[in-house]
Image (tube, grey):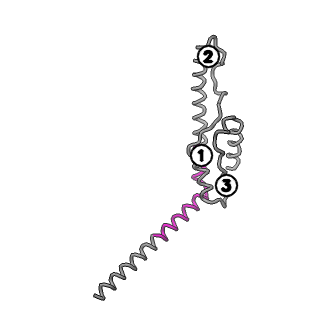
């Protein structure tokens, strides 16, 4: 999982446009706090690569005239965009796969569930105490 972010960072750095984008957050480790883990998954939830995908070009850029070159360029851009979207979706799918199996998230969910139970118990205790106080006041009158 650490290798994934290192590889993606390396690929993104190769592209000059990466300077305009934010740096990818670290994956963290088993002791990472919730905000570190959340930043990682939030970043990849809507991942967009800056890779150009020139390899996806189907036609040579050498056209007979400017109109033909423009048409070729537009067609090639469609192929690049398709490759870019497929790449982005693969990364998003991979990260969701990892996310579903991340033991840190299970731990965070358990902690939140325990805190919710404690809060509910405290509220119930407070309600019982208030009810008891009202009952005692009613008995005084």
Q: Which of 49 and 100 lies nearest the eye of the viewer?
A: 49
Q: CA–CA distance between discs 3 and 1?
A: 14 Å
Residue 44 is tagged as 1
Local secondary structure at mark 1: helix
Q: Looking at the image, which residue is at 32% across and 83% down?
A: 135
Above or below 28: residue 45: above
Above or below 78: residue 97: below
Instruction: Report the side of 129 relative to 27 (left or right).
Output: left
User: Split into 4 quadrants, where in the image is the C terminus?
Assistant: bottom left
Q: Quadrant of residue 15?
A: top right
Q: CA–CA distance between discs 2 and 1?
A: 36 Å
Which badge, 3 or 1, is on the more N-terminal residue? 3
Q: Position of residue 95 (x, y in %)?
A: 60, 47
Q: Quadrant of residue 47?
A: top right
Q: Position of residue 21 (x, y in %)?
A: 63, 41
Which badge, 3 or 2, is on the more N-terminal residue? 3
Above or below 79: residue 19: below
Residue 69 is tagged as 2
């Amino acid at each position: 999982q650490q290798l994934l972010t290192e590889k993606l960072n390396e690929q993104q750095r190769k592209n000059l446009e990466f300077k305009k984008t934010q740096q990818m957050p670290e994956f963290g480790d088993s002791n990472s706090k919730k905000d570190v883990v959340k930043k990682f998954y939030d970043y990849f939830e809507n991942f967009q690569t800056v890779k150009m995908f020139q390899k996806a070009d189907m036609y040579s850029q050498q056209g007979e005239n400017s109109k033909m070159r423009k048409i070729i360029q537009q067609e090639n851009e469609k192929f690049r965009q398709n490759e870019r979207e497929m790449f982005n979706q693969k990364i998003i799918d991979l990260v969701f796969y990892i996310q579903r199996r991340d033991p840190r998230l299970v731990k965070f969910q358990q902690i939140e569930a325990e805190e919710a139970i404690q809060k509910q118990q405290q509220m119930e205790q407070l309600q019982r105490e208030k009810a008891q106080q009202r009952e005692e006041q009613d008995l005084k009158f």
